[in-house]
Amino acid sequence: MNPRKPDALSTLMDAAVQAQLLRATAARPEQDVRPWPVVLMTAFGAWLAALPLMLMLGLMLGSFLERGIGTYIVAALALAAACTVLRLRSVSLFVEQLAIPGLLVGGGLLGYALFRDLHSQLAALLLGLTCLLFAVILARDWLRVLLGFAACALLALCGVSSHQSWSFNSDPTSLFIAWLLALGVWLGVHWVQKASYGDGRGAAAAAYIESVSTGWVLAVLAGLIMWSGKTFLLGASMGDGWVSDMADEVATRRQPWQFQLLQGISVALAIAAAFWAQHRWPSLRQLPALGVAIVLTVLAWFMPALGPVLLILAFCVTSARLRVATAAALAAAWVIGGFYYQLAWPLASKALVLAVAGLVLAALSWLAARGAVRKLVDQAGGMELSAPHGRLVRPGVLASLLVVLAVANIGIWQKEKLISDGQPVFIALAPADPRSLMQGDFMRLNFLALNAFDAVTMHGERVKRPYIVLARDERGIATVQGLHEGKPLAPGQFLMQLTPKDGRWALVTDAWYFKEGEAARWEKARYGEFRVMPDGRALLVGMRGEHLEAL
């Protein structure tokens, strides 16, 4: 059978399709197939070579960069040179990486000049638009992600109300609204991308939108994390000043209606996230998934930053943007952990909310697992599942439970023995304003006897847990005699082991925890009450007043 000859119309259509594919391929940036260790080492060498040269150039220009139009001229030259090098395809890897410091220096100088000469909000607006412009010029996906991140951060901060200059804490409510507007822009841009370029047309524009929007939404997640404050345990280990507690400030210092407004927005976004996930994945229209959505919506009421994060998570998971979805999941965990530090809520109430949420999620997981097991049994024709490892599950769980209980009870027994057998000792607290000692539900301790000790070394040698020698008077008040150097103790002397805390030595601990609402009771503390064993182990058991009265 002879094949049918193609007519002129089909030939023209095939040619048009092929031309469109060629244009899309040409517009798409070339993928970097160079091994990343080679790129990393080359970049490191390029930075080592470029930074001293730029530092020398800055010292030579000096006042020319500090004021006037000279800053703009040097910034424009640095940006133009960097963009020219980065757009070249035949340039070597070393020269390409030399352009990255130039791009940073040019952008930094431009930002310095704009913030120097203009109002901070207008400067942030112009710098954010500049980042979007350079994302068009530089067809590198990773650069576009970084520029999208910077553009979102700068443009979102333009909405923060400030009378003189911008600051993180100037207006937390406006900052939260700004992040919501940035989230709305991100969703709108993706809708435009799908509507306009979903059929394969405009590959270059679609690639630009995808890369820049990735950095944009990562900036939104980072902003919501910063807004929610410290997360559970991480805040105590990393200090109090590295992230602001804007959510707590809105809840405690602002008008109640502002926080309630943010709560309502968060709940609405959490509901939208649930509907979107069930719309894209109909298999989620079941009782366990609905229960999880309800629990997360309730949590979004208590944590205003959770609702926007859940919407980002739902959108990215259902659109196969797994890297951004992972970042959103981590952000959601951070926000939930930050609920612990919201001082507007009593600790018992916060614990009850999270405990109830955990129990509900556990029950839903059990129901979902039970249904899955029944389905497997039905599919197997009712056969008994007798895998060898199945018989070891219950004994393994029981053994783990016994080990946990044994470890916990041994620790309790040791502490009880120390309290009953240790000799009572009172050590004076360093003078301090009690109001500066109160931080939530604990009190910072600073014992007067330890102020003279070095936090790292003893006689020039690094030590882990040194011992100090103390002497106790007739009332039980101890005074420090010095570090223990291995010599025999004199009558009336005893040892105590020091503990490293935040670069300083502490006696057992540097904090005294108490029930919320009892701060006034412990403001009168002047001595710490310890129980000390002969081997130097000690335990802080209470606080005493000026005349050693129990508090």
Image (cartoon, rainbow, N blue to C red):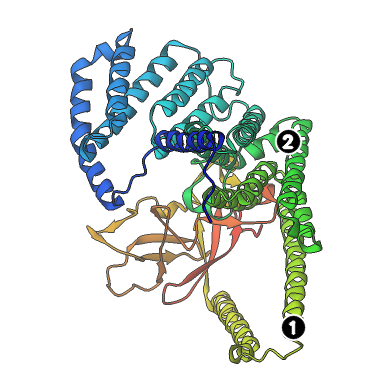
Is the residue marked by circle 1 packed among few (<14), some (14-19), or many (20+) residues within 10 Å? Answer: some
From this viewpoint, is residue 417 visible? Answer: yes
From this viewpoint, is residue 525 visible? Answer: no
User: Measuring 47% from the left and 49% from the top, which residue is drawn there?
Assistant: 238
Q: 388 or 231, which is in the foreground?
A: 388
User: Measuring 53% from the left and 18% from the top, which residue is drawn there?
Assistant: 121
Q: Which mark is residue 262?
A: 2
Q: In the figure, residue 29 lies in which quadrant?
A: top left
On the image, the x and y values in percent for residue 340 come to 65, 52
* Vertical placement of residue 502 versus 55, above or below: below
On the image, the x and y values in percent for residue 97 come to 26, 37
User: Measuring 67% from the left and 44% from the top, which residue is drawn there?
Assistant: 311
Q: What amino acid is found at the position of numbered circle 2 in the picture?
A: Leu
* Vertical placement of residue 304 versus 449, above or below: above
Residue identifier under label 1? 377
* Vertical placement of residue 520 versus 57, above or below: below
Is the residue marked by circle 2 packed among few (<14), some (14-19), or many (20+) residues within 10 Å? Answer: many
Q: In the figure, residue 486 lies in which quadrant?
A: bottom left
Secondary structure of the residue carrying numbered label 1: helix
Q: In the figure, residue 550 lies in which quadrant?
A: bottom right
On the image, the x and y values in percent for residue 194 come to 62, 37
Q: How many marks?
A: 2
Q: Which mark is residue 470?
A: none
Q: What amino acid is found at the position of numbered circle 1 in the picture?
A: Val
On the image, the x and y values in percent for residue 71 come to 32, 14
